[in-house]
Image (cartoon, helix red, strand yellow):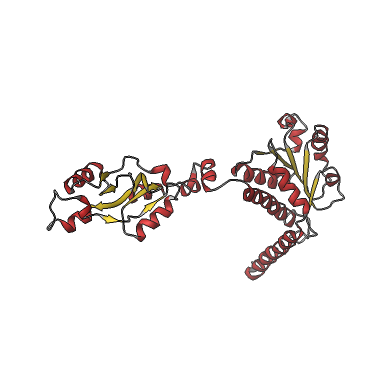
Amino acid sequence: MNISKIKKIGQEVIKLESIALSKLSKSLDKNFIKAVELISQQNGKIIISGVGKSGNIAGKIAASFTSTGIPAIYLNPVDASHGDMGIIEKNDILIILSNSGESHELSDLINFSKKKKLKIISITSTDKSLLSKNSDISLVLPDHKEADKLQIIPTTSTTMSLALGDALCCSLLSIRKFDKKSFSELHPGGKLGKKLKTLNDIMDTDIPIINSNSTIIDAVLIMTEKKYGCVVVLDKYKKIKGIITDGDLRRSISKININAKATDIMKSNPIIASSDLLISSAIILMNKFSITSLIIAKENKPVGIVNIKKCLEND
């Protein structure tokens, strides 16, 4: 086995495909913009189809659309010809992938869609193909060579088709109100969903609070009851005035009167966070300021509290 030769072949494949992707990026034109606008205005679902390797790419593109809140499904054109046309509804948009644009398996799907007056977006390598001529919007891949030594295995063409599908999906995200919270709601399971959880998902709304007229003994009692190692001091408008931690109490124990006002040992301007802060970011914030509990507030009014242990369990 010639290790250096194997590595060189691999590098050549990647280089060839990266050059093709660069050409694809430069080739995007008004048809790409039209495709994004059409999909953004759709009231139905996106049906994505292709044969063979193009079908595999179509399935991945459909999954990407669905994961970002755009209803999409992969429809095998052969299955469509044998009863699955019933999936298609009048407000749907069809995206068809075919390198040659001449795959005979697509004929029934194209004819059915045109009869139903569905809009068709094609991704193919030539605008002279049967598929392109029957599409409302044709996205044509630039000239390219397949990356295998015979130049016949779908490699460069499928890489470009996948990248073009990603470009459509991500461009749509940029013009829609879809953020990390929206993504998290669609991905509640798995590591990714966990990483996108916010403080709102885990915060405790039973907050240890006292008013500014409370005594130090009041603070101790509330701190003991709530078990967060701190109490939040509120002013007369129910806004955060300061915080007292168990560390503040220990450091002041030899010189305080427990019947004195809590504000005497209170720290002003405590660290607070918004409820939409990612849990991972909250951990970084608490470590930065060496605190174990974090107040969650809206317009400087407390809405929740969380400790670092709870954050670590959910990160």
- Image quarter (top left, top right, bottom left or bottom right) of the N terminus: bottom right
Does 119 appear above or below 161? above
Q: Is residue 72 left or right of residue 255?
A: right
Judged from this view, the residue extending furthest toward the front is 236
Does 99 appear above or below 206? below
Does 20 appear above or below 136? below
Residue 128 at what x, y percent from top left?
A: 87, 50
Q: Which of the 4 image quarters holds residue 183?
A: top right
On the question of residue 53 being in view, the answer is no
Residue 308 at what x, y percent from top left?
A: 34, 51
Relative to the observer, which residue lies in front, 45 or 178? Answer: 178
Relative to the observer, which residue lies in front, 218 or 200? Answer: 218
Residue 148 at what x, y percent from top left?
A: 74, 60
Judged from this view, the residue extending furthest toward the bottom is 4
On the question of residue 40 being in view, the answer is yes
How many numbered marks have been drawn onto this rendered protein structure? 0
Q: Residue at x 31, y 56 (%)?
A: 291
Q: Residue at x 25, y 47 (%)?
A: 212
Residue 67 at what x, y percent from top left?
A: 59, 43
